[in-house]
Amino acid sequence: MEKLNKYIDHTILKADAMPADIEKLCAEAKQYDFMSVCVNPAYVPLAYNLLKDSDVKVCTVIGFPLGMNLPNTKADEASLCIKMGATEIDMVINVGMLKAGNDKYVEDEIRLVKHACGDILLKVIIETCLLTDDEKIRACIASKNAGADYVKTSTGFSKGGATTHDVALMRKTVGTSMGVKASGGIHSYEEAKAMIDAGASRIGASSGIKIMEGK
């Protein structure tokens, strides 16, 4: 597989991550030339300063990990993070609203955040482990209708992560016009390759180096 490194968003989102952890993450991302680092909003300025002379992007998470923030709060958070240097945004949908059948709420919320993002890449985390296949399809359709750039499987903070079944279903639903990001529980080259073979165009993982060394 060519340029596996450019599939990987090198990630650290745990609550006890310290500035030194972010510094290590960014150094590793530059060494392996990963596509991005994915960090919590509080660390966007630090990551930006560490990576501004590289081609590694700064990705951050919005409404993370529950997705239950107000839509305007998510949009404002995205806007602030972009001003601080974020070049990709991963937002969590309101899963409860989707499950209640309020797809319009979900779509409108995504559209609001995408408006705040402008040309900045927006990935929509649908938290597949909490959804039926029908709900996953509806979440993908809402994301596509709202103008998002990617759909993403998981936060990694719920009861399950990415599966090849979900990635394939998401890819089938959005077609070739959107990206699909597999995240949560991907720890090896074999697992990453399986996700890519199923249709993933990006891998979110805290095990980026292990994946590369496994290759």
Image: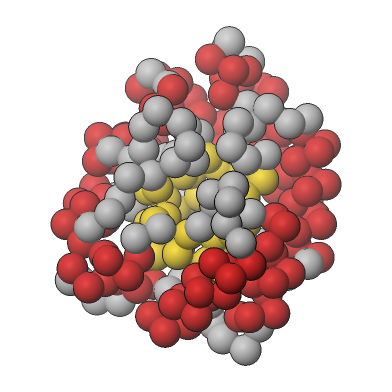
With 158 as the anchor, is 145 left or right in this view?
right
Q: Where, quadrant-wise, is the C terminus in this rendering? A: bottom left
Residue 168 figure quarter = top left
- Residue 38 appears in the picture as rendered: yes
Residue found at the far bottom of this picture: 53
Q: Position of residue 77 (x, y in %)?
A: 78, 48
Give the side of residue 54 with respect to residue 116, left or right.
left
8 in relation to 159, above or below:
below
User: What colouring method underlies this structural image?
Assistant: secondary structure
Q: Residue at 67% across / 39% down in the picture?
A: 63
Give percent across and percent down for residue 3.
30, 76
Vertical comparison of 164 with 210: above or below: above
Residue under the point 36% across and 32% down: 160
The image position of residue 24, as x and y in percent, is: 50, 74
Number of marks present in the image shown: 0
Task: Please identify the quarter of the rendering in which residue 192 is found.
Answer: bottom left
Residue at image location 21% in from the left, 61% down from the top: 189
Describe residue 155's horizontal placement relative to residue 195 as left or right.
Answer: right
